[in-house]
Amino acid sequence: MHMCTKMDKGVRSIFAMKISDLKYAVHPIDIKSSDKVQRQEIPEGADLDQFVRQLIASPLFEDENRKFHWPSPIALVPKLLSDMSRDNDEFDDATQVLAERLHEKERQAQDRVARLKTEVQKGSLIQISFRRDGQPHILLVKVHLAPFLREADYKKQNGYPLENTVLKMSLIEFDAKHCPRSMSVADSNARLAEYWWKEFLELTELTTDEFNTKTAFNSVEALLVRKLRKDYRADYYQLRNNLIGYFRTNRHYNHTKMLGYVFGDYVPIANQVNVEELRAAANELPKKDKFDSKFNIESQFLDKRKRTIIPLTEQIDLELKDAIENMRDTIHSATMRDGTQGVFIRSPQGYHYFGGQPRSAAINVQQRK
């Protein structure tokens, strides 16, 4: 038996592919009403071929690059997938075993989340084997059922919507020896479900959440330092504040959403700052610095990084302990009538420390005058 070597880390694009040798199996997964999983027979004349091709070209993979691998290529799941890609006679048996495995893992996942009054969404597992440019691929897709009214009699039924149908996906590309060469995992939710990639597929992360959190934050911050801190400090501090704010207010990192949060509607203070160029450069950072575009944020890493020290004079530093909402309104430069330049900090709490009178006292003083 041929032993597979470790998978490549890269995942090649599946878009605009030429598909051949298409074969698929559909298994409804119902953890409530059935103890058995049976392959669904596809009636003649069904439009499923077009639906399956639509799944293969799903845009769900476009912003996904979470890296996984199988520690052992002869474990159950990679062995079954290799058999499916190598021998059509193995397809039916292998897809049945995988469908039964998903049924079991979904039941276990449902037991864990039952106390939270949430449910593992009902749907079907579609397992697709195909070739692109002579290379074998397997695509595993969990699609959800949605209620609709049948046009003929307006009776309520369940079916697969043609749009926004995918819950979870995994694409495996094989080399010439039918060993898994690359793996891509996608989820319609912000967080990749562990029962899918870890328990069902037996995958291990190549990069941890801690590594991703540190690398992603440091990578974007380093870009701001290089492009802004020397000549455009005001914009540097504003955008760094936005970056800290994103990491502090989100549990799950999404690189596309981070770009929108940090750069989306930002109006630069210096006219020379090109926000779109900054955003374009930041968009390339996951590939450049090798961190995932989606992961769970490990917030404890930010406890030290969230502080910002700004020197004001030789004796005074301004310390920002965390991200500030509406920072431009809270802290900004000011010039007095005599031309003296300084920094204005909106702080009702600190006002009286420097001789300011409470508002009621100030009003009484003006009335006496």
Image (cartoon, rainbow, N blue to C red):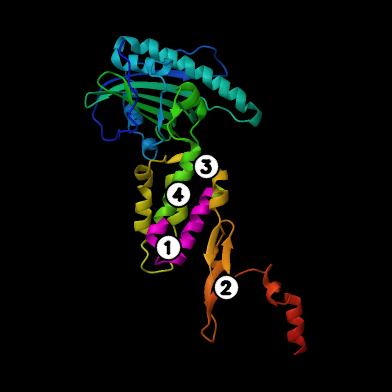
Question: Mark 3 or 4, which is nearer the eye?
Answer: 4
Contact check, label 3 and label 2, Cβ < 8 Å: no
Q: Which residue is mark 4?
A: 218
Residue 297 numbered mark, or none = 3
Report how far apart the C-alphas of labels 1 and 2 lie in the structure. 21 Å
x then y, percent, for residue 166: 43, 31
Against 122, residue 227 (above or below) is: below
Question: Mark 1 or 3, which is nearer the eye?
Answer: 1
The secondary structure type at the circle numbered 3 is loop
Q: Amino acid at mark 3?
A: Ile
Residue at x 55% of width, y 68% of height: 331
The secondary structure type at the circle numbered 4 is helix
Q: Provide the residue span drawn in magenta.
A: 224-247
x then y, percent, for residue 38: 45, 12
Contact check, label 3 and label 4, Cβ < 8 Å: no
Q: Amino acid at mark 1?
A: Arg
Pointer 4 local density, CA inside 10 Å: few below 14, some 14–19, many at least 20? some
Residue 157 in sight: no
Report how far apart the C-alphas of labels 3 and 2 lie in the structure. 34 Å
**Mark closest to the chain's N terminus, 2 or 4:** 4
Report how far apart the C-alphas of labels 1 and 4 lie in the structure. 15 Å
Which quadrant of the rendered structure holds the C terminus? bottom right
Whether 134 is among the magenta residues is: no
Left or right position of 139 against 208 = left
Q: Which residue is mark 2?
A: 344
**Mark closest to the chain's N terminus, 3 or 2:** 3
